[in-house]
Image: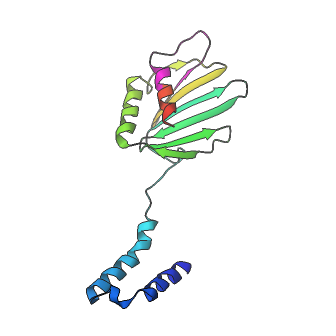
Amino acid sequence: MFQHFIWSKLLIDLPSSCFSNHITMKLFLSLLCMTPFLFACKSTHFTPKTYKGDQLVAGSSGGVTGMMKEYVLLDNGQLFLSKGIKGEWKPLKSLKKSQTKEIFNKAEELGLGTLRFNHPGNMTYYFILKRPPRSNETKWGESGILPPEGIPAFYHYLISLF
């Protein structure tokens, strides 16, 4: 209702000299009518719970406080953060398609889709690569056991994007 008032007020206040001919007036009114549709268009956004595509999760849990933190990258480029037990997803930003593809390729190159490494510790770090219907988890943090080469560096790189 308020929006209608603004548009009608705008039309009333415009001097007739703005529209030198009938075609200009029609064009203006057509553009004016289309404006609300332009603002109504939004790209589709998902959450990690509703998304059906590939996901890369990087997380940490444990320590003195038992804090849990998960970062998720969807293969459409959306980034999310979840802290604590509730697991509510906070949307962050989106990455470019090319960068997202590079990250998922690197995850495959490191073997995150098939690697069997489950060594949690007091402070545990992990990756979960979800490629429906499959999912694979890699955990490290156990004292005296080093994760496979490249895994910690990739973890820190991924976290730095968030």
Q: Is residue 159 above or below residue 82?
A: above
Task: Answer with left or right where residue 70 lies relative to residue 36.
Answer: right
Q: In x, y percent, where is residue 60? A: 60, 28
Give the residues in magenta.
138-154
Quarter-of-image position of residue 76: top left
Q: Residue 130 or 74: which is nearer the viewer?
A: 74
Q: Position of residue 133 (x, y in %)?
A: 45, 37
Q: Is residue 38 above or below residue 133?
A: below
Vertical comparison of 73 with 115: above or below: below
* Viewer-proximal residue among 73 and 21: 21
Residue appearing at x 45%, y 15% in the figure? 149
Q: Residue at x 50, y 42 (%)?
A: 79
Residue pictured at 53% horizontal, 42% vertical:
80
Name the side, left or right, on which 118 lies relative to 43.
right
Vertical order, 17 against 77 (above or below): below
Does the magenta run of residues contain 146?
yes
